[in-house]
Image: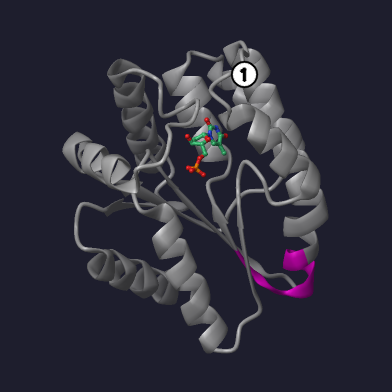
Amino acid sequence: MKGVFITFEGGEGAGKSTVARRLAAALQTSGQEVVLTREPGGTQGAEAVRGLLLDPATQLTPLADTLLHFAARADHVARVINPALARGAVVICDRFYDSTMAYQGYGLGVDKAAIVKLIGLVGLIPDLTFVLEVSESTTKQRLASRGNAADRYELMGAEVMARIAAGFHEIALTEPARCVLVDANAAADAVFARVAALVAERLGL
Ligand code: TMP
């Protein structure tokens, strides 16, 4: 039995977590076993790495940052994602390796070919990836309305953020069989409806 692996990607305030939660609930209601998880994180060790990565006080070079994301990912894939897929579950992950390519590769200038090698080493490719896109003004509004302290990545400047957004866009266009670009400026209900329709159409769920 082989499950299905769905990932949600995008910049800050794109609404990934909300739509991922709604999709998980809808698939659960239809009788699927669903594992909803996130990166960085998803296991005890990877959540500890997440704390370090998001802490604004942490100082890391872009390469060290990249390797820590992959350390967390290797643990998460081996302990949670692969076993769930082997049981036949639907695994929904809030961010996965496209975030490393966009943030550390496009955003922070880490060698993209090296990131591709690390992706190969972990060895798991999503069946379907939603890349949620929002305008700069929507991002600002949504981050401001959250009101919590900015994490280490949210403190990166506008130029880095623009490179990350362009990176996500390029990734989605380069891999149309796996990735779908979703305009996430729309109301949450409309974004969810589009995602649910695509999951039905592409995966038959
Ligand atoms: P989020 O789960 O609230 O989106 O926060 C995770 C942060 O970590 C977000 O700013 C993006 C960043 N990140 C990377 O820089 N590289 C990665 O590979 C992943 C998974 C996340």
Q: Is residue 117 magenta?
A: no
Q: How many marks?
A: 1
Which quarter of the figure is the N terminus placed in? bottom right
Using the image, determine if residue 38 lies above or below residue 122: below
State the residue at coordinates (39%, 49%). Answer: 176
Task: Assign a secondary structure to mark 1.
Answer: loop
Using the image, determine if residue 10 lies above or below residue 93: above
Q: Is residue 29 left or right of residue 164?
A: right
Q: Nearer the viewer, residue 139 or 160?
A: 139
Q: Position of residue 190 (x, y in %)?
A: 23, 68
For disc 1, the marked residue is 58
State the residue at coordinates (41%, 29%). Answer: 154
Q: Nearer the viewer, residue 120 or 158?
A: 158
State the residue at coordinates (81%, 50%). Answer: 78
Q: Which residues are magenta?
A: 84-91
Q: Position of residue 200 (x, y in %)?
A: 42, 77
Q: Which amino acid type is marked by label 1? A: Thr
Within 10 Å of disc 1 (Cα), the crowding (few <14, some 14-19, many 20+) is few
Using the image, determine if residue 116 lies above or below residue 11: above
Q: Position of residue 27 (x, y in %)?
A: 52, 80
Where on the picture, by quarter, is residue 47? Answer: top right
Q: How is the image coloured?
A: one colour
Q: Is residue 7 left or right of residue 173?
A: right
- Res. 205 in view: no
Q: Is residue 85 magenta?
A: yes
